[in-house]
Image (spheres, helix red, strand yellow):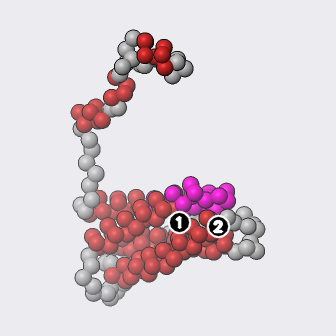
């Protein structure tokens, strides 16, 4: 039997998946980009796999080891007559990227709170899949010039170095408070 926290977290995930899947499926009917369509198809396929895994985990009669399928390849074909909505590929890409990142983060955090080792591992795996999908959206957005991640300069990196590395070492915490107060360099 699963712990209540595991059941509650998966129930929340399942309800979120319903709305997200509908939105992503709508995007597949709007986009004119074969590359975006491919990533959307992969995310939809992965999320449907996630729903199937969670439903199997929630089945009290299920006792077999469950395996998360890899992210499927998209078999979606470009629409000959896409829906005419006031939404550009730019908007859909950034929204789908944000969604994949949010779902990855949610799965990572949920996994850390889950009690059943199999449920915990599967949600960690789901998080990795969503993170990989988010990276594909990011790559596409970068290719299109919609997203950039500038590199830090050497000076910026040097300024970020933790200043604690440059401070004198303080006396050992095993010293008594009285000994520490008398030690040189202790404030």
Q: Quadrant of residue 154?
A: top left
Expressed as whole percent of the image width and height from the top left, the position of residue 91 reads: 28, 72
Q: 55 left or right of 90?
A: right
Res 135 visible:
yes
**Mark on residue 71?**
1
Q: Nearer the viewer, mark 1 or mark 2?
A: 2
Examine the structure image and report whether residue 119 is included in the region drawn in magenta: yes
Q: Quadrant of residue 161?
A: top left
Q: Which residue is mark 2?
A: 4
Q: Nearer the viewer, residue 74 or 20?
A: 20
Q: Quadrant of residue 142?
A: bottom left
Residue at position x 39%, y 11% from top?
Answer: 184
Expressed as whole percent of the image width and height from the top left, the position of residue 33 reads: 32, 74
The residue most toward the front is 178
Q: Secondary structure at mark 2?
A: helix
Which quadrant of the rendered structure holds the C terminus?
A: top left
The span picked out in magenta is 109-133
Expressed as whole percent of the image width and height from the top left, the position of residue 113 reads: 57, 57
Secondary structure mostly taken by the magenta-highlighted segment of the chain: helix
Q: Nearer the viewer, residue 7 or 63?
A: 7
Residue at position x 51%, y 22% from top?
Answer: 173
């Amino acid at each position: 039997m699963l712990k209540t926290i595991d059941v509650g977290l998966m129930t929340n995930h399942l309800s979120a998946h319903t709305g997200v899947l509908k939105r992503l499926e709508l995007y597949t009917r709007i986009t004119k980009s074969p590359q975006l369509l491919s990533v959307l198809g992969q995310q939809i396929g992965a999320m449907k796999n996630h729903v199937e895994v969670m439903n199997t985990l929630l089945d009290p009669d299920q006792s077999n080891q469950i395996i998360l399928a890899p992210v499927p390849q998209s078999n979606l074909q470009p629409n000959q007559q896409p829906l005419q909505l006031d939404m550009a590929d730019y908007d859909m890409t950034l929204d789908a990227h944000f969604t994949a990142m949010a779902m990855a983060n949610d799965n990572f955090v949920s996994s850390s709170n889950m009690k059943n080792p199999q449920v915990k591992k599967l949600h960690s795996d789901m998080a990795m899949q969503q993170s990989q999908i988010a990276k594909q959206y990011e790559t596409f957005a970068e290719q299109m010039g919609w997203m950039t991640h500038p590199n830090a300069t050497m000076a910026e990196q040097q300024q970020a170095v933790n200043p604690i590395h440059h401070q004198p070492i303080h006396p050992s915490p095993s010293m008594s408070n009285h000994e520490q107060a008398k030690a040189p360099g202790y404030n």
